[in-house]
Amino acid sequence: MSANVDLNNRPDYDKVLQDIADYVLTYRITSPEALNTARNCLMDTLGCGLLALRFPECTKHLGPIVEGTVVPFGARVPGTSFRLDPVKAAWDIGCIVRWLDYNDTWLAAEWGHPSDNLGGILAVADHLSQKRVANGEAPLTVRAVLEAMIMAHEIQGVIALENSFNRVGLDHVLLVKVASTAVCAKLMGADREQLLAALSHAFVDGQALRTYRHAPNAGSRKSWAAGDASSRGVRLADIALRGEMGIPGVLTAPQWGFYDVLFSHTNKDLALKPEGQRQFSLSQPYGTYVMENVLFKISFPAEFHAQTACEAAVTLHPQVKDRLHEVDKIVITTHESAIRIISKQGQLANAADRDHCIQYMTAVPLAFGNLVAEQYEDDFHAAHPIIDELREKMVIVEEPRYTREYLEADKRSIANAIQVFFKDGTHTEQVVVEYPIGHRRRRAEGIPLLEDKFKANLATRFVGQRCKQIFELCKDQAKLEATPVHAFVDLLVI
């Protein structure tokens, strides 16, 4: 046989895809902690979306592609009056959820925000629940939404544990697309073959580059990229349910597969298989681990690697607020991931640039005692030159222990320390914060504050009586789980 002829023996689906499909279709969620955390995550994620509606740069993206489009049983976008097809609704919900960089976070070899998947999940569930009732069937309940969230978190988070997509230049929204595809296909009634086909298309797609997250090209695409990815998951699930064939060897196909084309960059974080092909390293089976350990952004709308730096800066604010022009040097001691992602010098071009700059996110609370979304905007930055003056005096130092414990499974710290030195030779103490308020180790302290955050975000969009109704429902685990999805979303629209 000629060496130039391809053997056309169609393979079985890659094991990575089969494991995801089997998890989604067969795993039964029984963990009370996961379900309770998912309820809190649902509250927080929706609240982040409602808050984002205050920003015209976000709302300009929302609504139907063709104005005036009428969609029977259309999915609703919380905080608005839009009723859209599930693909565009997923885009819009994902966009508002991520816009302010305020929803949950997962940090490992890869980073990401697993609640980004709520865009696809809520859009599909709302549409299907309305359609079922119209057909005389039982509606979907919020329990199905919570279970889908847990599974999406798990798929995105477990793959992220030991596989660094950022080191090969790919953006973490790839994992949003994969997770949304899996759980939305299940909600839509996919069988195993259809689900596998949908997943294969999620990997064969072109994948987003991280260019828009890094200097000198950081920009607002990072605020809608996850909504785009989640909506793509809905679209791919729909394509598969229409009978489109899959690509079984999408990951492992020599030369043409995902591993060889997009995951072959040489680096120590990627697992090299005996046959010489770099493949995913998956260290644990899918369960409920990620939701139980997810990180909430409670205090600050800021990239998570800087959350503890912001906490430390707030602590130091009383000592430095009257001496800002006397500052000689500010030392930020941090971990390697923060240095690689968000340490920046020079001019910051826009709000999206500023909320991914550890120096900016530290300077603002040092000077003003807090950090809120409006403080990233152009007008605020222009009005307060002290921010850039402080940035210029910052020194970034890596602490190897912080870097090491960031990746240790029993710690997963996100440590930062701040110390301010003055021109007269005096200095503050070094304030160290190793675990942010949204960490699992600080759940008891953090959840009441998360609830306060949700109530404040509700109040930006709804009257007091509606806010109280939504909050009380969300506080009641059993009642919320039993609520039809469309009835729950009814409370969230204008």
Image (cartoon, rainbow, N blue to C red):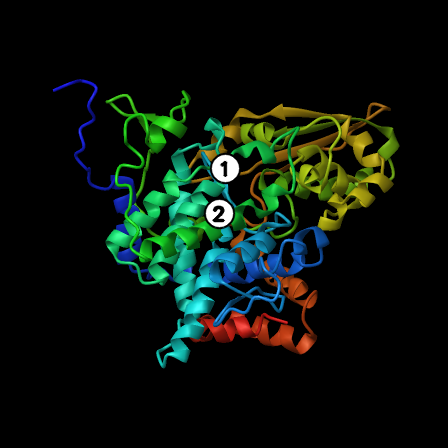
Q: Quadrant of the N terminus?
A: top left
In the image, what residue occupies the spot 80% across and 45% down? 368
Left or right side of 399 for 118:
left
Q: Position of residue 27 (x, y in %)?
A: 28, 56
| Residue 379 left/right relative to 157 | right
Residue ranking furthest to the left? 1
Q: Residues within 10 Å of mark 1 (few under 14, many from 20)?
A: some
Hey, which quadrant is residue 484 in on the image? bottom left
> Mark 2 — residue?
229
Residue 367: x %, y % from top left: 80, 40
Q: Residue furthest top?
A: 3
What residue type is disc 2 on? Ala
Q: Quadrant of the C terminus?
A: bottom right
Give the side of residue 74 with respect to residue 355, left or right: left
Q: Which residue appears at 76% of the width and 41% of the height?
A: 364
Looking at the picture, which amino acid does disc 1 mark?
Answer: Ala
Instruction: Please give the label number shown on residue 160.
Output: none
Task: First in sequence, mark 2 or 1: give its number.
Answer: 1
Give the residue displayed 57% in from the left and 39% down from the top: 434
- The residue drawn where x is 48% and y is 39% is 172
Residue placed most toward the observer, 423 or 481: 481
Q: With respect to residue 192, does 274 lie above or below?
A: above
Residue wearing tag 1: 208
Q: Position of residue 328 (x, y in %)?
A: 81, 25
